[in-house]
């Protein structure tokens, strides 16, 4: 996942309304109007949130007649989770190495 794409995902997830929208469309596809009625914000505000989620590719929008349906796309979130797991492994390995080094110092072993 490119850094810019990762930035879009984390930015989209930073807002609680957008997270709730994702949770809603993950359960079932919804029209923009349905989403607007579920939240205590205006239709234009919902549309702005949807644009952010769309830019992050966390949802897909499909026009059917006069309605636009939103559905969940979990791939960008899976990619972000993979990035997080890589960071976790790096830091775990780094701290394990530091712990081993400090234990060796404490026990009088300098590793030389």
Image (tube, helix red, strand yellow):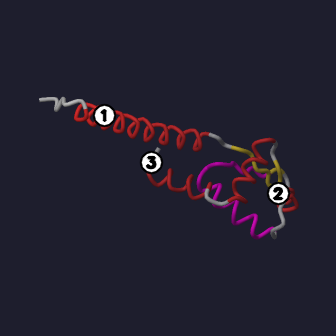
Q: Residue furthest front?
A: 107
Label 3 SS:
loop
> Where 3 falls versus 28 (above or below)?
below
Residue 52 covered by magenta stretch: yes
Q: Position of residue 74 (x, y in %)?
A: 64, 41
Front residue of this view, candidates 76 and 95:
95
Q: Which residues are magenta?
A: 43-63
Residue identifier under label 2: 35
Give the CA distance from mark 3 to mark 1: 29 Å
Q: Position of residue 92 (x, y in %)?
A: 41, 36
- Residue 19 tag number: none
Residue 12 in the figure: left or right of residue 85: right
Label 1 SS:
helix
Q: Judge depth for marks 3 and 1 and give the one in front.
A: 1
Residue identifier under label 3: 2
Name the residue rendered at 70%, 58% in the picture: 16
Q: Residues within 10 Å of mark 3 (few under 14, many from 20)?
A: few
Q: Residues within 10 Å of mark 1 (few under 14, many from 20)?
A: few
Residue 27 in the figure: left or right of residue 107: right
Front residue of this view, candidates 105 and 14:
105
Residue identifier under label 1: 97
């Amino acid at each position: 996942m490119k850094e810019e794409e990762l930035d879009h995902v984390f930015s989209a997830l930073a807002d609680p309304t957008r997270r709730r929208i994702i949770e809603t469309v993950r359960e079932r596809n919804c029209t923009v109007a349905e989403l607007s009625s579920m939240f205590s914000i205006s239709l234009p505000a919902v549309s702005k949130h949807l644009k952010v989620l769309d830019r992050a590719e966390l949802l897909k929008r499909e026009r059917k007649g006069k309605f636009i349906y939103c559905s969940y796309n979990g791939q960008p979130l899976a990619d972000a989770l993979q990035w997080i797991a890589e960071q976790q492994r790096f830091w775990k390995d780094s701290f394990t190495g530091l712990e081993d080094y400090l234990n060796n110092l404490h026990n009088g072993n300098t590793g030389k």
